[in-house]
Image (spheres, rainbow, N blue to C red):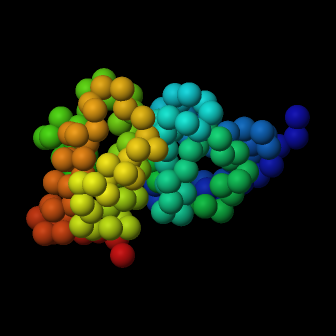
Amino acid sequence: MSTREITLTVNGRRTTLSVEPRKLLVDVLREDLGLVGTHIGCEHGVCGTCTVLRDGRSIRSCTTFAVQADGADIRTVEGLAQGPELHPLQEAFWEKQGLQCGYCTPGMLMRCVEILERDPDPTPQSVREQIASNLCRCTGYATITEAVCAAAEVMRSGARAGTEVAS
């Protein structure tokens, strides 16, 4: 099968690779780039486990062809932490027990990062509505909502260097 050259900026690192036109973005991330934090759940774009950010917007990487992302800025869960410091959202998920089995966590984190970048002061109701597109079988969403609101507060206060919300 023929291949097509694409260029992606993944977690701030620009890379060019040859892919088959039918290869999914999630497979490029996991197989070609070794970024296995993005999980594969339903493979139909329903569960949200494979959520990544493309140019700042959440997408389902299991239903996006890699060639559709050519030229895009892709952020995965591996790109959240800066060095040894967790992102405030990751820290809040840990502190508020916003995860149990952890399978949905990478996709949920990426969806929640998008929420916080769009609205630095979300209400619990707003968070619940916006995370409804990502499925979690374990937590019941209450602790996830608490974690997002707690992270928002930390990010607004600038309690740690590098935690400011992008504008």
74 relative position to 105: left or right = right
Position of residue 53 measured from the top left corner of the image (x, y, whole percent): 49, 54
Q: Quick check: 44 left or right of 58?
A: right
Identify which residue is drawn at 88% across, 40% down.
2
Residue at image coords 55%, 50%: 59
Which residue sits at x=71%, y=53%? 68
Q: Quadrant of residue 69?
A: bottom right
Q: Which percent across, then down, holds residue 58?
A: 50, 54
Q: Residue at x 35, y 36 (%)?
A: 105
Residue 23: quarter of image: top right
Q: Is 44 above or below relative to 127?
A: above
Closest to the observer: 68 or 140?
Answer: 140
Q: Quadrant of the N terminus?
A: top right
Q: Quadrant of the C terminus?
A: bottom left
In front of the other: 25 or 19: 25
Q: Is residue 80 above or below residue 152?
A: above
**Residue 84 in view here:** no
Classify residue 49 as left or right of residue 90.
Answer: right
Question: Residue 12: horizontal and vertical position, in percent?
Answer: 47, 59
Residue 131 location (% of width, % of height) = 38, 47
Q: Is residue 1 visible?
A: yes
Quarter where residue 28 is shown:
top right
Residue nearest the viewer, comparing 66 with 44: 44
Seen from this angle, which residue lies furthest right? 1
Q: Total marks drawn?
A: 0
